[in-house]
Amino acid sequence: MHRIMFVCHGNICRSPSAEFIMKDLVKKAGRENEFFISSSATSTEEIWNGVGNPVYPPMKEELERHGISCNGKRAIQLQKGDYVKYDLFIGMDSANIRNMLRILGGDPECKIHKLMDYTARGGDVADPWYSERFDVAYRDILDGCKKLLESL
């Protein structure tokens, strides 16, 4: 069983997109029983009184344009105890990686990686919260998830 946690800053755009894109790819490959996939945030900005915000509407619309539903997903925060529960922690950018290392207390088993490092181009998945390019974020995340799945 491959246990994967996708991580971004708020868990309302990039990491939930990666979660549901990866779930879609795994399902289409007939490998659903091989994976447990989730996503979380490095911040609490999208979590109020213990309840997380849903996926940001423009990102949700981009996913729906590609036939992917993220209904019911709400932001959650990455916890130190998650380190023993997952095999891979996939961050969207360098800041996510730094914050993951802080929250998780390091990475002695080399479980933390950046999504775009699975592609030939590397780099960060630009945050569509700021760029408003939800289509570009979707494309990058899809490319990264395809390559991640190929590696497993």
Image: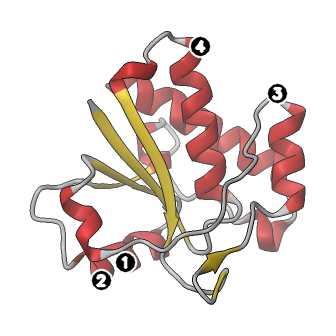
Quarter of the view holding residue 139: top right
Residues 50 and 96: in front is 50
Q: Earlier in the sequence, mark 4 or mark 3?
A: 4
Residue 10 location, x and y as percent?
62, 74
Q: Which residue is the extreme one toward the top?
A: 30
Q: Is residue 61 above or below residue 107?
A: above
Q: Amino acid at mark 2?
A: Arg
Residue 129 location, x and y as percent?
78, 70
Query: Quadrant of the image for the C terminus?
Result: top left
Residue 67's disc number: 3
Label 3 Cα neighbours within 10 Å, binned few <14 / some 14-19 / many ≥20: few
Q: Which residue is mark 4?
A: 28
Q: Which residue is mark 2?
A: 102
- In space, the residues marked 4 and 3 are separated at their CA atoms by 12 Å
Residue 130 location, x and y as percent?
80, 74
Q: Amino acid at mark 4?
A: Lys
Q: Are marks 1 and 2 in contact (CB under 8 Å)?
A: yes
Visible in this render: residue 126? yes
